[in-house]
Amino acid sequence: MQAFDAPKIGLKFVRDTISDRLKFLMVSCHVTIVGRAIAGWMWVL
């Protein structure tokens, strides 16, 4: 039973890791864009 579950657990772990990485990248990109926008506004003001 354990031997059959291992690949599924491994796949789930990999999938979760990839989705977490993607979320992190999207959030960091979003934060960077928002930060630049705010900095730009501050510069204009």
Image (spheres, rainbow, N blue to C red):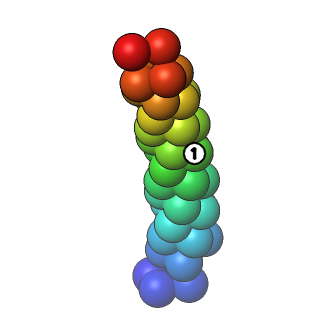
- Percent position of residue 25, x then y: 57, 45
The image quadrant that residue 38 belongs to is: top left
Q: Residue 27 or 16: which is nearer the viewer? A: 27
Single out the residue that lies furthest toward the front.
45
- Percent position of residue 41, x then y: 43, 17
The image quadrant that residue 21 belongs to is: bottom right
Instruction: Say above or below: 7 vs 30.
Output: below
Looking at the rendered image, the quarter that the N terminus falls into is bottom left
Single out the residue that lies furthest toward the bottom.
2
Instruction: Say above or below: 16 vs 43.
Output: below
Name the element at disc 1.
Answer: helix
- Percent position of residue 6, x then y: 54, 78
**Residue under the point 46% across and 85% down:** 2
Identify the residue under disc 1: 25
Q: Residue 20 or 5: which is nearer the viewer? A: 20
Looking at the rendered image, the quarter that the C terminus falls into is top left
Instruction: Say above or below: 13 vs 23.
Output: below
Instruction: Say above or below: 13 vs 18.
Output: below
Q: Which amino acid does label 1 sit on?
A: Leu
**Residue under the point 49% across and 23% down:** 43
- Percent position of residue 40, x then y: 51, 21
Quick one: label 1, few (<14), some, or many (20+) residues within 10 Å?
few
